[in-house]
Image: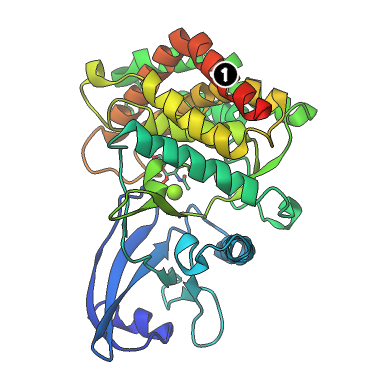
Amino acid sequence: MQYEKIIRVFSLPGEIISVEPFGSGHINDTMRVVMNHNGENKQYVLQRMNTEIFTNPQGLMDNVVKVTEYLKKIIMARGGDPSRETLHFYPTADGNMFYTDAEGQCWRMEDLVSGTRSYDMATTPQMFENTGVAFGQFMADLADFPAEELVEVIPNFHHTGKRFETFEQEVAANRSGRLEGCRAEVEFALARKTMAHTLVDQLASGELPVRVTHNDTKINNILMDEVTDEPVCIIDLDTIMPGACAYDFGDSIRFGASSAEEDEQDLDKVYMRLDLFEAYTRGYMQAVGKAITPAEAKSLAMGAMVITFETGIRFLGDHLNGDTYFKIHREGHNLDRARTQFKLVADMESKLDEMQAIVDKYYRLANEA
Ligand code: GN1
Ligand code: MG
């Protein structure tokens, strides 16, 4: 079997029953591994880390292990189950947290949390509200984690200003020759330079505090209980880094409060759902409203718009580069993704006051309680 040698490196007990592709990530390759030990099946997740993008797999795994070990203690202290509520990684036989094969590919092995599933879209506002609670709680849990111990795995990951500069260069270079086919989208983006700088400038001036942030807070990065649909475990900790909470709040909204999928081709179906925005905000504030500063509360609605814009220019930049970063599954996939993001940005521009009023309301309620 193709993966047998790699799986064996992690010294898991039992015989390999199956290995199959798993999940919907755009970066790493993920496999579900089933092992049978003493007549019982147990599931694991095997991942090949994309080292073109994560050039420091050692630093990345150090971050992830530090954070999960820290979370295990916090979860235990509040009477939770650390084996389900955070990730558990297996070392290789020689004690490394990942394995580098003969071709230089890096692999890691973790438990698959049993009895859970993930969703690309909330099936009810309640589910999305619970997602808000989970990510709010996650930030609260890491409030005292020493952020300076974290390696910046992808420098300036959510520095929208620098992302904008990169985008300008990608437009100028037009490496794929596709610029003519996406002029309107490029113009939309270039007209929004100011937006790219708002939050990062506030972070740099100290107006917004630096937090430990997840940086990829899509709803599909939460495992939900198969029976109750309640959040169990936050996954994909690869991009944990110091950052602004508005980006985490915003990325949840970008992905989860959208009326359609990230790559929907019919733009009439794409808009930001205020009912879902409100549901998420209610949950988030309930979990973390007391802990965030008034300046942070003021930045959240803007955060949703800025991260959506940032993700849009990343997709469009990748389209112009010839699809070298995000995995694509069809011609023009990154352009389709950029279009949904810009449609959402335009919609949020017209709804920003309403969004901010919702944030203010739940921030006030959390701080009155
Ligand atoms: C990537 O691979 P995945 O789906 O977890 C990307 C995120 C983007 C996201 C867009 C390391 O995440 O930043 O928001 O696609 N991760 C990286 O769906 O670039
Ligand atoms: Mg991710």
Give the residue number, with chain letter if any, for mark 1: 361
Query: Residue placed at 68% from the left, 42% from the top?
Result: 211
The location of residue 142, given as percent across then percent down, is 65, 51
Q: Is residue 170 visible?
A: no
Q: Toward the viewer: 178 or 314?
A: 314
Compared to residue 206, the image places residue 228 above or below, namely below
Q: Which residue sits furthest front?
A: 369
Amino acid at circle 1: Lys
Query: Residue placed at 39% from the left, 85% from the top?
Result: 12
The location of residue 348, given as percent across then percent down, is 44, 15
Q: Is residue 124 visible?
A: yes
- Badge 1: residue crowd in 10 Å (few <14, some 14–19, many ≥20): some
Q: Which residue sits furthest right?
A: 205
Label 1 C-beta lies within 8 Å of the nearest ligand 1 atom: no
Query: Residue placed at 36% from the left, 47% from the top?
Result: 26
The location of residue 110, given as percent across then percent down, is 43, 70
Q: Which residue sits furthest bottom?
A: 38
Q: Looking at the image, in which quadrant does ligand 1 appear? A: top left
Q: Quadrant of the N terminus?
A: bottom left
